[in-house]
Image: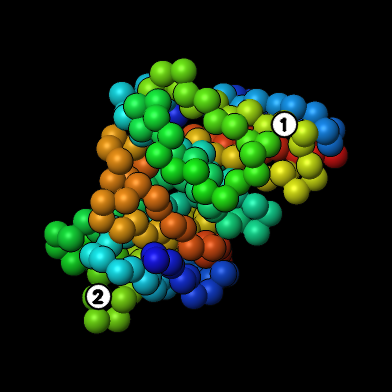
């Protein structure tokens, strides 16, 4: 059983399009995250939700909107995609807010052309 | 503010040789420290974590790390490198009470036969 699963694994789209990435965790965790890993492998947190409530919202363009329908899901919607949005996006979850251990999904490689 | 510095973006070792990956941190409070491994096209996997218990932390796959407060370091070691250890390794820090985990830029480990 996959603990943290993301779909799709690969996403190629044109500039200006709107796309969504889905994430689900079956670990019963309360906290979920979205991270962005750029081409230089730099990994940076974007958002964090705890029990469907937004906790962390880093300096991310408002074209990025996370949505948590329940605590097992955290989806990422991106409007008006730009070339600079190309990256690998990782979903993660942890049992508590202190992030002592986060479990990561396999990532979604987004390519904007 | 918390930060992490990983010295050496690329490290090459011979199979059977000692692995040493360096990590220095900055934190205004006692930190949680982590090492994660990322295999090609995979998500991050937790190797080990320090949470203010024993300063020498043992992780999976024979890795261990020692927390040295005086040096603000958390270097990762393994006595004998195996070909399967070739991957990207990320050091990360989280300040007590905060969710946000800050990652280093990663160190790519190459194991030479």
What scheme was used to colour the molecule? rainbow
Can you name the residue that lies furthest to the bottom here? Answer: B70
Element under label 1? loop
Judge from the rendering whether residue B82 lies leftward or rightward of residue B50; answer left or right: right
Residue under mark 2: which chain is it in? B
Can you name the residue that lies furthest to the front here? Answer: A62
Residue drawn 64% across the image and 39% down it:
A62
Judge from the rendering whether residue A26 lies leftward or rightward of residue A21; answer left or right: left
The reply to whether residue B113 is visible in this rendering is no
Work out whether residue B49 or residue A34 is closer to the camera in this orientation and state it. Answer: A34
Can you name the residue that lies furthest to the left here? Answer: B53
Judge from the rendering whether residue A106 lies leftward or rightward of residue A13; answer left or right: left
Work out whether residue B55 or residue B64 is closer to the camera in this orientation and state it. Answer: B55
Instruction: List x then y, in percent, for residue A15.
Output: 84, 36
Residue that mark 1 sits on: A79
Element under label 2? strand
As drawn, the label of residue B110 is none
Residue that mark 2 sits on: B68
Quarter of the figure with the C terminus of chain B: bottom right
């Amino acid at each position: 059983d996959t603990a943290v699963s993301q779909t799709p694994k690969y996403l190629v789209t044109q500039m200006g399009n709107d796309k969504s990435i889905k994430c689900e965790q079956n670990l019963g965790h309360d906290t979920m995250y979205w991270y962005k890993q750029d081409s230089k492998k730099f990994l940076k947190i974007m958002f964090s939700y705890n029990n469907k409530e937004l906790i962390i919202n880093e300096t991310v363009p408002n074209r990025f909107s996370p949505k948590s329908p329940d605590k097992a899901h955290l989806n990422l919607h991106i409007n008006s995609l730009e070339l600079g949005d190309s990256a690998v996006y990782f979903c993660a979850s942890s049992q508590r807010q202190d992030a002592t251990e986060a479990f990561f999904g396999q990532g979604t490689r987004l390519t904007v052309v | 503010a918390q930060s992490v510095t990983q010295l050496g973006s690329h490290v090459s070792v011979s199979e059977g040789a000692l692995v040493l990956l360096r990590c220095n941190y900055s934190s205004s409070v006692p930190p949680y420290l982590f090492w994660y491994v990322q295999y090609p096209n995979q998500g991050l996997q937790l190797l080990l974590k320090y949470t203010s218990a024993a300063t020498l932390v043992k992780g999976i796959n024979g890795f261990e790390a020692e927390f040295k407060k005086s040096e603000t370091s958390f270097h990762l070691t393994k006595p004998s490198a195996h070909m399967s250890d070739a991957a990207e390794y990320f050091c990360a820090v989280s300040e007590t009470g905060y969710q946000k985990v800050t990652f280093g830029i990663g160190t790519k480990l190459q194991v030479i036969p």
